[in-house]
Amino acid sequence: MEKRVKYKSSVKDPGTFGSLELSEVMLLFVPNDPKSDLKLKVQTHNIKSQKYTKQGSNKPPWLNLTNKQGRSHIFEFENYPDMHACRDSITKALAKCDEESNKSVVSTPAEKLSMAEFELRFKLLRENSELQKLHKQFVESKVLTEDEFWSTRKKLLGKDSIRKSKQQMGLKSMMVSGIKPSSDGRTNRVTFNLTSEIIFQIFAEKPAVRQAFIDYVPKKMTEKDFWTKYFRAEYLYSTKNTAVAAAEAAEDEELAVFLKPDEILAREARQKMRRVDPTLDMDADQGDDYTHLMDHGIQRDGTNDVVEPQNDQHRRSLLQDLNRHAAVVLEGRCIDVESEDTRIVAEALTRAKQVSKADDEITKDANQERLERMSRAAEMEDLQAPQNFPLAPLSIKDPRDYFESQQGNVLSEPRGARASKRNVYEAYGLLKESILEIRMTGLSDPLIKPEVSFEVFSSLTRTISTAKNIIGKNPRESFLDRLPKSTKDEVIHHWTSIQELLRHFWSSYPITTTYLNTKVGKLKDAMSNTYSLLDAMKQSVQSDLRHQVSLLVRPMQQVSFLPTQQEFYYIMSRLSLIFSTCIVSIQFNQPNQTLRSNPVNELKSE
Amino acid sequence: MIFKIEDVTVYFPYDNIYPEQYEYMVELKRALDAKGHCLLEMPTGTGKTIALLSLITSYRLSRPDSPIKLVYCTRTVHEMEKTLGELKLLHDYQVRHLGTQAKILAIGLSSRKNLCVNTKVLAAENRDSVDAACRKRTASWVRALSTENPNVELCDYFENYEKAADNALLPPGVYTLEDLRAFGKNRGWCPYFLARHMVQFANVIVYSYQYLLDPKVAGIISKELQKESVVVFDEAHNIDNVCIEALSVSVRRVTLEGANRNLNKIRQEIDRFKATDAGRLRAEYNRLVEGLALRGDLSGSDQWLANPALPHDILKEAVPGNIRRAEHFVHVLRRLLQYLGVRLDTENVEKESPVSFVSSLNSQAGIEQKTLKFCYDRLQSLMLTLEITDTDEFLPIQTVCDFATLVGTYARGFSIIIEPYDERMPHIPDPILQLSCHDASLAIKPVFDRFQSVVITSGTLSPIDLYPRLLSFTPVVSRSFKMSMTRDCICPMVLTRGSDQLPVSTKFDMRSDPGVVRNYGKLLVEMVSIVPDGVVCFFVSYSYMDGIIATWNETGILKEIMQQKLVFIETQDVVETTLALDNYRRACDCGRGAVFFSVARGKVAEGIDFDRHYGRLVVMYGVPFQYTLSKILRARLEYLHDTFQIKEGDFLTFDALRQAAQCVGRVIRSKADYGMMIFADKRYSRHDKRSKLPGWILSHLRDAHLNLSTDMAIHIAREFLRKMAQPYDKAGTMGRKTLLTQEDLEKMAETGVQDMAY
């Protein structure tokens, strides 16, 4: 763009005629008189502000640009439209500059992102489908940038989460011998249903069976035959008829394997004895007590118990089984194989055992740790200053479960009934009052009276449980559960996305840069988009549920409009805390929806 | 903290001290000053051990001219480790404050099996075979032989230790068994012989009761301890039983058969020596004529068990002429075995005094009392002469000779009981001839005589006046301490009925009643759902526990319990029980929670602590009475009645209740700890039973808790746990100080107020 202008270095300056060339990066003034040395170059990003004369005043159309060094350049245009065109293009160029500078600031850390961090982000997205959905919705539709999205989730990206391995699943406490066969009622035939879980337990508790499986299947017999034999042996064992068991074992050597005492177990036990806590080691007593010399001491005075001598070959008591079972459950699932193939499981288990055995011999750490534990046990805790030991991190899969369980507590409290009458609007009222007060008197310290905030929070907490009961007929059944699954998912999804948008929205205040300005604009658009989606959803539900859904949706819609209200803008720029309370309240207002993360804390940190 | 008790500066490794610990130290110091014996009962969970250790070590430091030695006896090896652990803590503290002059040498002592580091020897299964495997590599004649024959296997650790000779010393410090092993392995010295050697230099020795009470062991290990030693018997409530066990021996069919085989072997050896090395047997004969029962200078590795009779009862005479010759001695033993075999062939239970037994032995087998008395010494001399190393093979003949020596030595306080079968299993013939000691004072008498101070202490010594009578000694201090409570951290309850109001009991006629079994089960099912972490249950016997668990398994009660907590059980297999305990602790540590089923009078009840989260609740199912129809018990009760005028019933109740108290008493370790105790039997509500419980339990047993049903107990438990979860002031409230600081102690010393806490 090129305009004919008169350049003045000051207001008094009569001016030099020339032409002004405008581009995105710079503006160039070339005087008409080639001999003049008043050639001027101004970098766009150097421009600090521009002033111009208003149309309709009797001044000529001047444009005054001040650069960052404080020098001003005045251009006199031929007419107003020329000046306006020029001004607009400078504004645009400035905005672009701003954005670029902002971008460069933001993108520097992004470039530094290591592969590890990217992997971590991917991992998080993979593991958390809700997060993935949000990411897809906002980042891919360019409402938020990648970094903005993650900046509110620094905790997830923290060091702890990198180190935290996948949580191991525990085993069920039920004994395998507890599985009862199902019979068809007519014949003597019984059927056992074996799941991979049960097979895992059998293998873990009875290494001899595991070894036999590896040895026999499929070379000597099929898997089915193997298990038939196994349960035959279990049956013989359960009849407690050792004579019959012995007789059958004599005939069938494979069956005998199941009835024999487990040698692998005995070996493992000896192994484990070496790293047992010495203050528990009763085996050491046996090696010490000289009265336990054969036939020394008192044999039959009624203190020592008598136990029927048993057939050595087939002794295996319930008590041993119980101990073994509990030990296996305590150890947990030590292999990472999720396979239907029994053989793979068996082999993986054998390998895992061998590895742990090898570990024992190498590591001194375990020994060291054992000694430390011993010396700690020797101390008397309350005679000295308390020692703080690091706590294991608590890993809660779904915080919703926590609130479900809290409902019971609130209900059982006698206060609950009375308190539930105080609804969420009252809490709003209180909050509003205090906001008004602040507007009248200005900021004081503390911002909100502790009593007020306490009242707000506690009444809202109670509302979570009561809303559920008021809406659902059956107190155990939440209203949400009655919605069709797709609708329910949709409601929850909208909820989380609104939450996400709001979080970003409020964190953009005060709007100081154009960058934030555009961001807020984008957020606003996305929010109104959500509003229409909510509306559509409301229409789509069945009529009998529509009322409830609209009850549910209303606070969300209100939220979608919140940012348009001027007074909220004003206060929000200062009192992010109050507003986070609002967000919490809205969250609570929706039954069955719980705090996914605490916005209060996050906002504070930002 | 550092404070003064009269003229002794006590170094105590903590910042605070309980008032009862302070009191305990004061009393202990008085006893040490008076150079007399004392009897101190202090509740568990008040830090008895550390108070005792810090006073005695500080006492030693304050009297550098006449250093006393501490001999600390524990019942089990794991308690020994625990004590050494506490001593380590104390020692570190004292060295930190006093520098090197506070350094002491403290060692734990145990058998070869627990101390050996030679992997080949350790491969043996039990203690006796480890002993034998060791002896095969270290006996003097084996080592002599190896100089000629390089193929003879020796133990490198022992050889290195021998080579180092007098230079083989332990630097000062506190050594647990594990530390000893590590040290030995590091230096290449045998830790077992090193530890034995260091006994004479050590300032503190920790070992088990038997090393002092059993003459067979004490004769070798403890004979060199000086009189200025302080002997402590910790957890001594069962000390009378240990004493009588040390002097009791029994003979079975298998013993006799084994002894016969041993004699054949000995006979062969004698013949072989006669042919090859007749001079050796002649030399032995000459030695015996001269009256040297044993070669005086046995090298350490040749020593074995000493004479089973107490030191002052052993005759210092020459061995009688009729058993001096090896063949003659073998003949005498053959006749003895024959006679014993005839006596075992009885249909009825027979009870006899040693005197009449000896006289009938004399008339029928022609063996005199004096001959009997020398049996043990003669056998040992013969075995050394014959260079027998596989001592574990020769245990049966050893046992018979022990029996002969004891029966020949003692006329009083013993009886001989011959039973054809066990009363409880009459269908299984298992004849047994038992020489049982009734008088606990016999075995402990030499200890009281030899050492200037003997301290007997435990959490349960009630009634405290009974012990001096049982052990026949006069203590200079005899005191029972109460526990000052910061809050009511123990909650004993007596449960008499189930939820259906039917009474529960393990009385013989009621114990197998399905209603009782079910109510016992329901109690546990309810409790595991409200009690966090560890729960421990004690049953009256293995067989009862076996039965009740089987029933619970069938009726699904066990499954309900397992839904809440993991289940671990004490079995008669020690290895398995140890692993179960270890896993139980792990389960409590990781928060899963567990139940441990155990047996009163069993190995676990004897010395395993269930403190802190390892035991928030103990349920004592039934009253752990002894099997009262036992012949030996009857004989002992008679003896007690005749000698000490102790009534039968009183003694039985006393014994049962001390066991019960011992079981439940292990839940508390400190005042910050808390735990519940349920006595589940209607008989506990009776005053005569209940009143035998130690005072510190009784004082917390409220009248309202004396006759509870299951649902009431559940309610109380809930309330109790809720109360315990509240924060509290550790220093004590309402003017009663339950935790003293250094300033408190200084103030007390100034004003002279001693009983501030009570």
Image (cartoon, coloured by chain):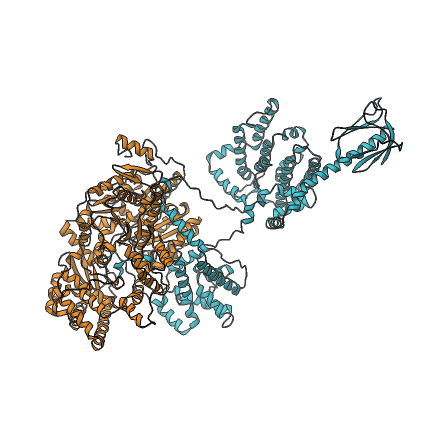
Q: Percent from the top left, x then y, of residue B333?
A: 17, 70
Left or right: residue B691 compared with residue B525: left
Question: Which quarter of the figure has residue A543?
Answer: top right
Quadrant location of the N terminus of chain A?
top right
Q: Percent from the top left, x then y, of residue B121?
A: 34, 64
Badge count: 0
Between A32 and A186, which is closer to the camera in this rendering? A32
B656 in relation to A588, above or below: below
Question: Which quarter of the figure has residue B194?
Answer: bottom left
Q: Do we see residue A362 in this rendering? A: yes
Chain with orange colouring: B
Which residue of the protein is positioned furthest toward the bottom in this rendering?
A: B275
Quadrant location of the C terminus of chain A?
top right
B202 in relation to B432, above or below: above
Q: Percent from the top left, x then y, of residue A10?
A: 81, 25
Left or right: residue B294 compared with residue A374: left
Chain A rendering hue: cyan
Between B243 and A73, which is closer to the camera in this rendering? A73
Q: Do we see residue B605 in this rendering? A: no
Between B18 and A208, which is closer to the camera in this rendering? B18
Question: Which quarter of the figure has residue B144?
Answer: bottom left
